[in-house]
Image: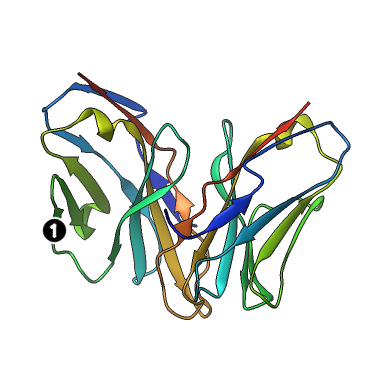
Amino acid sequence: DSGVTQTPKHLITATGQRVTLRCSPRSGDLSVYWYQQSLDQGLQFLIQYYNGEERAKGNILERFSAQQFPDLHSELNLSSLELGDSALYFCASSVDARSVGTQYFGPGTRLLVL
Amino acid sequence: AQKVTQAQTEISVVEKEDVTLDCVYETRDTTYYLFWYKQPPSGELVFLIRRNSFDEQNEISGRYSWNFQKSTSSFNFTITASQVVDSAVYFCALSEISNFGNEKLTFGTGTRLTIIP
């Protein structure tokens, strides 16, 4: 158990819908990262937050957005869902953004868009 | 741009055999970190090791060992006396240093390891 929690574990929805994925980092970790794992794209970095502020962006679609709240939990919002958004979404956390800490991953949310 | 290559897509070995998973990386930075993660069939990503670019010492942890060679930009992972529980997808990853610290991991495509009982 990495200490990172993600909810829900599984999500089934329809095209055009909007979903929210939630992540709670390990106790004491200020940095949260979101990754997408799909069959065709592999594991890809989406976005990073540090203590409530966006720090880095990867290949995140405009239909996707994220935020980190004062209690440090983070949410990833996916809207206007398409079939191709079906993937495993991981959240990871590390101690802070100034030292290269190890990123510990949550169990992931498996999203299926029908 | 940074890149990680895991040329071995799938490997199968008989239990108790040794197996080496290859990882080759590309980066322009002189300071960077390398990682290995394990993804068992249950799907989670489990951290195995982190190595910084200034530490080329090989590391051993039980049946696992890692060989980091800057001259060939490789960070290979060996499992000795493999066990069925080692069956998983293994990912090598690279993190570059920025002004903000650890920004993102660039992952290889993974190697699916199957240990045959």
Residue B92 location in percent, x, y? Answer: 36, 48
Image quadrant in which you'd find residue B32 = bottom left
Colour mode?
Answer: rainbow
Q: Identify residue for label 1.
A: B58
Q: Is residue B81 left or right of residue B7?
A: left
Which residue is painted at 43% across and 57% down in the image?
A2
Q: Determine crowd level at label 1: few under 14, some 14-19, many 20+ residues with C-alpha closer than 10 A.
A: few
Q: Is residue B10 above or below residue A94?
A: above
Q: Is residue B46 left or right of residue B87?
A: right
Q: Quadrant of the C terminus of chain B?
A: top left
Q: Nearer the viewer, residue A28 or B18?
A: A28
Image quadrant in which you'd find residue B52 = bottom left
Q: Is residue A13 above or below residue B48?
A: above
Residue A96 location in percent, x, y? Answer: 49, 77
Label 1 secondary element: loop
Q: Is residue A76 left or right of residue B5?
A: right
Q: Is residue A49 above or below residue B15?
A: below
Q: Amino acid at mark 1?
A: Asn
Residue B19 location in percent, x, y? Answer: 17, 33
Residue B57 location in percent, x, y? Answer: 13, 64
Which residue is painted at 64% across and 37% down in the image?
A87
Q: Is residue A63 left or right of residue B116?
A: right
Q: Chain of mark 1?
A: B
Which residue is painted at 55% across and 75% down in the image?
A30
Numbered marks: total: 1
Which residue is painted at 35% across and 72% down in the image?
B31
